[in-house]
Amino acid sequence: MTKLVINEKKTLGHIEPEVYGHFSEHLGRCIYEGIYVGENSDIPNENGMRKDVVEALKELKVPMLRWPGGCFADEYHWKDGIGPKESRKKMINTHWGGVVEDNSFGTHEYMELCRQLGCKTYVNGNLGSGTVQEMSEWVEYMTFNGVSPMADLRAKNGHEEPWHVDFFGVGNENWGCGGNMTPQHYANEYRRYQTYVRDYDENYPIKKVCCGANVDDYHWTEEVMRTTFDHAEKFHGFMDYLSLHHYTFPHGWDLKGSATDFDEATWYKTLTQTLYMDELITKHSTIMDQYDPQKKIGMAVDEWGAWYTCEPGTNPGFLYQQNTVRDSLIAGITLNIFNKHCDRVKLAALAQMVNVLQAVLLTEGEKMIKTPTYHVMHMYRYHQDADLLQSQLVDDTTTGIDEWMVPKVTESVSKDADGVITITLNNLSVTDTEQVEVSFFEDGYKVQEARIVTGEAMNTYNTFENPEAVVEKAFDGIEQTNGKLLVSLPAHSVVLLRVKK
Ligand code: AHR
């Protein structure tokens, strides 16, 4: 039996809602078809946004949405995506599938989407192939309230009022698709470009995201911190976040592996890669600590999730993949890791929102289904804006096959403003139920709500014909005795408990 000891008297930090953020790129069918179908579509929409998708996303309490990329961001020239749609420039999306990008979804449409979702905006600027002036003018276009060429242009295009840009990425993956730069070169470019990302409204300062490392490139973190920190220390708003990207590839970047057809060894191998996020955050954060021990600069894990070989028969450049019970564990494990690191991880974005990589929603024409990952994100929404509580597993053991050993259980615990405690538990075993005894500092806690996401098998998934093979359900595997909870955690499951005195 595993024991989970919770000290509800000890708060370790605050879980920022933006840790539960999402990412939407001009990639495959994420934006076009998945979210935006245009005002003239037969698919029910509001100002071009699919109503079914927006409604489902609102249930997740999406706190923030990153756009327009990804690699696309460093090729995106924002002026192509404003003004009358018929005269917007058509171009080839060279990065993703070589298809025509007609720019019908641009700045105004993105802002409208965020308005409908009620979420914060995270715009990723183009440092790789764009100019300082272009970046500066985009910020002016979006946020300046007054007389200026860009504010006038915005008004001419139908939006008199400025919008709020909550987060702004100064480049994306500039060590790779964003210009193949060295860390020193990028860091100097960051210093220059960010200068012109101006705060036009002092009530809504823009939080800037500096491009951080690819997975375990600790040298990048070290050099970027070294080259920028004199300014980050002196000037408020110089750098608010440093990013980190880490994807789970079952068989590595080259082979990836099927989303739905895998054996038990691959299940454990995949989860070891997901668990690696903990080590990555710890090590990058330790480097950041040498400069920023007070953790004023947050870590933004603004791309995470599973990346498989795309679904057979689909455009390989579209990164369309299915989503199984394994993905629900990948989501549950990762979000527990983020919660535990809430002192440093202040923002994150699952890649990507619809129809791409570990999507929460899949669409086919007018049909839409929720993936297992959706249901986990829905259960975990209670952690948003809550305080992390001290919690620890005792007598816990590992499971796995060959060298792919993983803990049987992972967890995180938070308390919201109403004093309700949220406990999220994952059973990583493919085959075995695990008994978990949950105890508190004080007695008297009662379960208010218990939910579970699991499926018949480790690779069960939802299809357009059978959309409810994996859903969130009420969970009754709990006994309450002597102030403790005995939870019978089914194999390959993610469980939510909400308790209060
Ligand atoms: O999410 C897909 C791609 O992965 C993004 O465009 C890029 O930033 C990363 O390499």
Image (cartoon, rainbow, N blue to C red):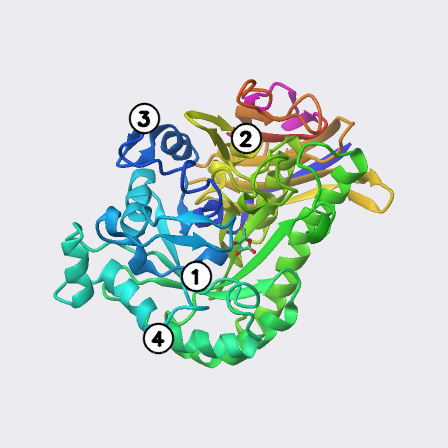
The quadrant of the rendered image in which ligand 1 is seen is bottom right
Is label 2 in a helix, a strand or a loop? loop
Above or below — where is 467 with respect to 101? above
Calculate the distance from the C-alpha at mark 1 to the C-alpha at mark 4. 21 Å
Calculate the distance from the C-alpha at mark 1 to the C-alpha at mark 2. 30 Å
Numbered badge on residue 75: 1
Amino acid type at circle 3 is Asp
Between 385 and 96, the one nearer to me in the picture: 96
Q: Quadrant of residue 497?
A: top right
* Mark 1 CB near ligand 1 (8 Å cut): no
Q: Which of the two marks, 1 or 4, is nearer to us in this view?
A: 1
Between 63 and 70, the one nearer to me in the picture: 70
Residue in the picture at 46% in, 43% down: 386
Numbered badge on residue 371: 2
CB atoms of marks 2 and 4 within 8 Å:
no
Q: Which stretch did the figure color magenta?
A: 470-490
Q: Which residue is mark 4?
A: 195
